[in-house]
Image (spheres, grey):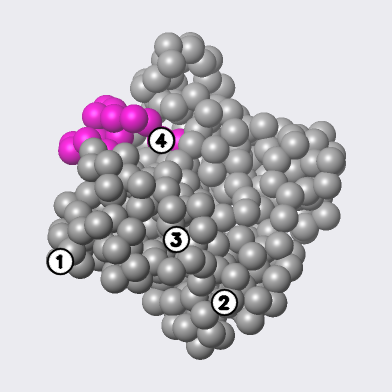
């Protein structure tokens, strides 16, 4: 029996708790040897960030898997939950696997469990995690990252992705796929955190000219979005256009356009397009341009990226789980 302990605490985000519990509980219904318990640092019931009250289980033995969910206030310094870090250290000491959901990575980092490891968290807080814990190699676009026995995931619903990956690691892709079907979720989400996406993560510009240009880029990434062409359409100078992008999105026009085109290429590859077709239809042009852009932004070649479709397991000797891609589970 694999004991999965989810460590809840006052202020915890409810879905960070319930998402993994649903995955492991469903896997257990299909025959996987999981026993899920909910604990708290002091053994008392907890109140989630939504106000929902959760009862916790009595303490038991050493967990096989420890899951630390996140909370809206967890990125604050110091960690605003008495006893949480000590509880993590105690439970993690004998656990075979330790995982965090969303901002739970901040608690793992405070406990020293992420030192010298790669990790991720909610995209809104990746920069803060990197600044506060320079010994952690933060991967801001990963849905989840596996580094040795420690796994971390992006925001909220990514806890479901994380738990499915652990089920696949333990029981194989077949059972994980059955769980995903039952929950009506992707076995592998079609995108990293950047699916939430360059346009979606870009604050709405106050400037009407820039707002119109960003809409054009999102609508047709393969169109001519060179600085001269955009400046002509916007009826501004190239220098002024560059200033608008810098002030409005914090990037040069070329960098922003490339980021949107890479996302478009990712979607095309996920849909079965060839590397050459994805390069042409996304606006990146040649295979080599696509390759350079992927390596620069994703750290993987387009062909390797495309080949990651059929499993939640990432490529590479360390079992990286970020930037994985696949289609949805069949209903």
Q: In the rendered structure, find residue 108 and report the number of the disc placed on it.
A: none
- Which residue: 83% across, 55% down? 174
Q: In the rendered structure, find residue 70 and report the number of the disc placed on it.
A: 4
Q: Is residue 331 above or below residue 37?
A: below
- Which residue: 34% across, 30% down? 72
Q: Are marks 2 and 4 in contact (CB under 8 Å)?
A: no
Give the alpha-carbon distance from disc 2 to disc 1, as whole Å. Answer: 28 Å
Viewer-nearest of labels 2 and 4? 2
Instruction: Categorize mark 3 by other alpha carbons within 10 Å: few (<14), some (14-19), many (20+).
Output: many
Which is nearer the N-term, disc 2 or disc 1?
1
Which is nearer the N-term, disc 1 or disc 4?
4
Coordinates of residue 184 in the picture (x, y in percent)? 75, 37
Give the alpha-carbon distance from disc 4 to disc 3, as whole Å. Answer: 29 Å
Viewer-nearest of labels 4 and 3? 3
Q: Is residue 232 above or below residue 284?
A: above
Q: Which residue is mark 2?
A: 279
Q: Which residue is mark 3?
A: 260
User: Would you say the magenta stretch is mainly helix, strand or loop?
Assistant: loop
Q: Secondary structure at mark 2?
A: helix
Viewer-nearest of labels 2 and 1? 1
**Residue 265 falls in which quadrant of the image?**
bottom right
Q: Secondary structure at mark 3?
A: helix
Q: Which residue is mark 1?
A: 239
Q: Is residue 225 above or below residue 51?
A: below
Instruction: Categorize mark 1 by other alpha carbons within 10 Å: few (<14), some (14-19), many (20+).
Output: few
Q: Which residues are magenta?
A: 69-82
């Amino acid at each position: 029996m694999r004991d999965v302990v989810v460590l809840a605490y006052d202020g915890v985000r409810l879905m960070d708790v319930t998402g993994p519990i649903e995955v492991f509980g469903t896997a257990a219904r299909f025959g996987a040897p999981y026993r899920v318990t909910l604990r708290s640092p002091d053994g008392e019931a907890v109140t989630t960030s939504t106000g929902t009250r959760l009862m916790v289980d009595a303490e038991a033995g050493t967990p096989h898997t420890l899951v630390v969910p996140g909370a809206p206030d967890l990125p604050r310094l110091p960690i605003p939950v008495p006893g949480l870090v000590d509880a993590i250290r105690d439970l993690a000491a004998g656990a075979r696997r330790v995982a965090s959901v969303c901002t739970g990575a901040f608690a793992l980092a405070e406990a020293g469990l992420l030192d010298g490891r790669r990790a991720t968290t909610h995209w809104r807080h990746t920069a803060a995690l990197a600044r506060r814990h320079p010994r952690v190699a933060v991967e801001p676009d990963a849905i989840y990252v596996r580094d040795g026995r420690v796994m971390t995931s992006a925001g909220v619903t990514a806890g479901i992705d994380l738990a499915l990956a652990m089920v696949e690691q333990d029981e194989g892709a077949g059972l994980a796929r059955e769980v995903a079907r039952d929950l009506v979720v992707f076995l592998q989400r079609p995108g990293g955190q950047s699916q939430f996406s360059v346009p979606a993560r870009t604050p709405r510009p106050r400037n009407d000219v820039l707002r119109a240009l960003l809409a054009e880029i999102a609508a047709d990434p393969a169109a001519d979005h060179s600085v001269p062409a955009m400046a002509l359409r916007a009826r501004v100078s190239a220098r002024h256009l560059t200033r608008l992008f810098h002030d409005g999105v914090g990037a040069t026009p070329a960098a922003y356009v490339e980021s949107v085109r890479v996302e478009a290429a990712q979607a095309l590859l996920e849909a079965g397009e060839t590397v050459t077709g994805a390069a042409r239809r996304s606006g990146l042009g040649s295979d080599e341009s696509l390759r350079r852009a992927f390596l620069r932004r994703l750290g993987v070649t387009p062909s390797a990226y495309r080949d990651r479709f059929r499993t939640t397991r990432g490529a590479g000797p360390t079992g990286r789980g970020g930037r994985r891609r696949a289609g949805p589970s069949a209903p």
